[in-house]
Amino acid sequence: MPTLLALLSVAMGNARYDDWELTQRLRKKFMAERTGIFGKFLALVQGEVPADALEAYRRGGQAVYDLLQQVENRRLELKIEGLNPWTVDPATQAQFLCAWNAFVLQTLGDQFLEADYQGNPATTGYVPPMTAEQSLAFYSQVGSWLSRARQAQNNPAYRLDVRLPAYLPPWGDDKPCPTTHLDGMVAATRLLRTHAEAAIAVFESETIPPDKQTAIHQIRQLLAAATSEAEYAEQLWAPNLPQEVHEQVEERAKNALECYYHLGQILAMPQLLDRTQPSKTQSTALPTRRLLPGDADFDPWCLTDPAIRDKWQCSPEAREAISTLWESDPDPQQTLAIQAEIDTALALGDIVYATDQWGTRLGHYYCCPWAPIYALKRPVAIARQQMYPGQEFTFDVSAMAAIDGGTFKRQILVKSFQPTSESCLPRPRTRHRHSRHRGC
């Protein structure tokens, strides 16, 4: 037991005591406790939440990393035995795929948590709510993939009970995302790249039949695409970037992570290759000659949700808002081309009108031109923006900034939408702006 003198020496910063090592240990403990108290206070002030649950998931990740090592060893054994990824039995393919998915999700959760701790060491053990939510979205899926991998490992007749390919959980709505999230994403891409390159080595084999060479070229292309996005994001990334560059890094890093997630599943189960190609709505978005504002038969309500067009057409303010929108659009041909891509994706079943958990339609965006809210059913690229199942989007077109001398807005807005009673209308160009609605 430490003596009273030792405790007083620690508290007063006095090291003049015979048991120097004991004093040092007590001092470190005292400082750690004082730092812990300060950290808790700082976390409370910053609105952070305890990371106890996330820490538990992180500890459980060792089983995932052990399993991945087993899978990589088994891949090499199969290659030595003369088997190629197409001739491996279905249960083994399933095990490889599930192990990869568990590894990616565990890695993302771990890297997001570690990035926050490194970026904010004073509040280690606490994270911002948005970080907790995003990390939990990754961690919460790990257990099910780990279980499936173990089942496939022990049952030669095992068949997966989920639709493939699987997709990453939706990303948070915060724009731009926190810098620590970018740190976590960039760190994760490095790890995923290393293991993806190791897995692709089994495709470099004389056992691959000639009729699979085209598929191998496509797989290499996917790896190159993911690596290019990851490297560019890492080269761009630095603290205190301008917002537009920050968003570029975020977009590139997310694209790389999605690509690596899908690539790993293809490397485990090559027959999935055909299912991962995004729908090419641009090539089918016809006709090339579209009716434009001013043409006799042009429909100014073509961007509006069909379910509520009649309602808005009866409103003088809404009619004026739609007219102002098209008058302000510097390139209506581009606006209509994007809408044509959306219409094509809807007709192909790549997207559907978004619904809530009870199957009721979410409806339309609250701003003029009141476009529908869509949900992704398959990977699709619209206006050169890649989207994936589980995401929701709308076509956000706005004249408000243009009316005030700014830039006309035309974007695919991807986020999670919630019901609202708000509505907004662009102000008319006339001097007497009688609309009291908030501009969009």
Image: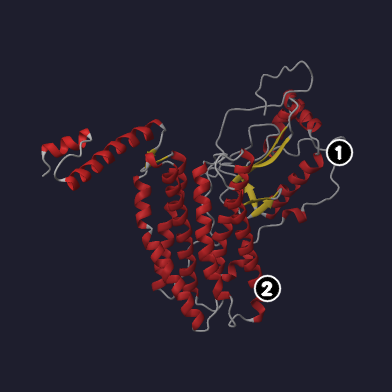
> Is the residue 426 above or below the residue 208 in the image?
above
Where does label 1 land, which residue? 297
Image quarter of the N terminus? top left
Residue drawn at x 86%, y 38% as measured from the top left: 297
Whether residue 347 is visible to the viewer of this picture, yes or no, is yes
At x 52%, y 41%, the residue is 178
Residue type at mark 2 is Thr
Position of residue 230 measured from the top left corner of the image (x, y, whole percent):
59, 55
Pointer 2: what residue? Answer: 214
Percent x, y of residue 54: 38, 48
Left or right position of 252 against 48: right
Q: Is residue 139 left or right of residue 348?
A: left
Of labels 2 and 1, the one closer to you: 2
Q: Quadrant of residue 206?
A: bottom right
- Give the mark, 2 or 1, whose residue is nearer the N terminus: 2
Quarter of the picture containing the C terminus is top right
Q: Residue at x 63, y 72 (%)?
A: 216
Distance between mark 2 and mark 1 Cα atoms = 47 Å
